[in-house]
Amino acid sequence: MSSNIKKIGVLTSGGDAPGMNAAVRAVVRSCSYFSIDCVAIYKGYQGLIDDQVKPMSARGVNNIINRGGTVLKTARCLEFITPEGRLKAFKTVQKHKIDALVVIGGDGSFTGAMIFQSEFNFPVIGIPGTIDNDIFGTSHTIGYDTALNTVIEAIDKIRDTAISHNRLFFVEVMGRDAGHIALNTGIGAGAEEILIPEENMGLDRLLESLKKSEKSGKSSSIVVIAEGDKTGKNVFEIAEYVEKYLPHYEVRVSVLGHIQRGGSPSCFDRVLASRMGVFAVESILNGKSNVMVGVENENMILSPLEKAIKGKSKINNDLIRVSEILSV
Ligand code: F6P
């Protein structure tokens, strides 16, 4: 592979996701494999602005593939939104003679990367790392699979206590404006109902469905609610509403929160992150820029960053159908 790229910088940005470390490791080791330098930028774009840059070697990423979080730290950097902030970042890039950037993060991080690329004509490539799976151009984002497994484990535990007390539980899961986590874990954990932003079932239908469940002999129930659902009420308000109209139900709420972002990455996420990291470096060396790596039907693909940001990652409608059939 012949290329003008002699040094790549790698950073993690936005919300952390399990598997980000595996992606960092893959980027660093691929650089070493192709005999180019690699530097780590700490705390996302903030580290570019503040010059928190350190050389990375293949051995420097030993024993991180199994670790959750990100060893490079991360941030949602407001200063990078300003032209002044980005100029400071560009000066850091010049100072360290970095020829291209690999940005591991979500759509906010990619928006920053795209603007940076166009302002300074600087090569950037994105690796999708977020538990939300809300990025267009990849069937899976790094961290999503691990988050699904974490949620399933938590709901299984909630079910034990729900059954013991004959209770109705409302479990709120993350996902920002997307319902992928809720829909998949709802089916996987056998939830009676699943509320997602993509399909507003409305509170009346929820009441009807819970009444039906009760009549059919269910003594406890689990409802999974995506944090971004569009009923116009938060999980506590929904619980209160249901308790008001179905007073015989003993209702409890569980907001799973940030446990969904932590923990050791699943094998799936480690392999995905490893493949994406290698492909990102290979793509840069092949002259690609302003693109995001993704996976579709087991194959690695590239999509323009703009599409990744603006496109909509779609919910699989068959999953909605399956969940309706199985909640009988
Ligand atoms: O994007 C990942 C995510 O965990 C979302 O699911 C959630 O809405 C958000 O980040 C929470 O952000 P923060 O950690 O800044 O509270």
Image (spheres, grey):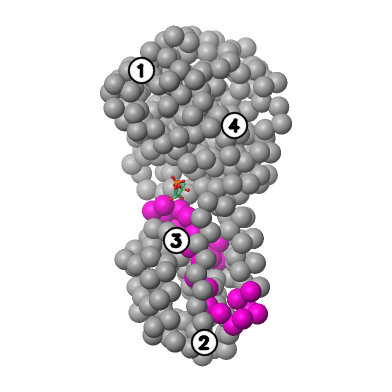
Q: Amino acid at mark 2?
A: Glu
Q: Secondary structure at mark 1?
A: helix
Q: Amino acid at mark 3?
A: Ala
Depth check, front residue: 155 or 120: 155
On the image, numbered disc 1 is attached to which residue?
A: 88
> Disc 1 vs disc 4: Cβ atoms closer than 8 Å?
no
**Magenta region includes residue 181:** yes
Name the spot of residue 255 as percent of width and height, x first. 50, 62
Please tell me how crowded label 4 is: few (under 14), some (14-19), or many (20+) other residues with Cα within 10 Å: some
Please tell me how crowded label 2 is: few (under 14), some (14-19), or many (20+) other residues with Cα within 10 Å: some
Q: Is residue 231 left or right of residue 302?
A: left
Q: Is residue 52 left or right of residue 56?
A: left
Q: Closer to the observer: label 4 or label 2? A: 4
Residue 214 is tagged as 2
On the image, numbered disc 3 is attached to which residue?
A: 226
Residues in magenta? 161-187
In terms of sequence position, does the residue under pointer 2 or pointer 1 come before the other? 1
In terms of sequence position, does the residue under pointer 3 or pointer 1 come before the other? 1
In 3D space, how far apart are the residues under numbered discs 4 and 2 (Cα atoms)?
Answer: 48 Å
Name the spot of residue 304 as percent of width and height, x first. 39, 32
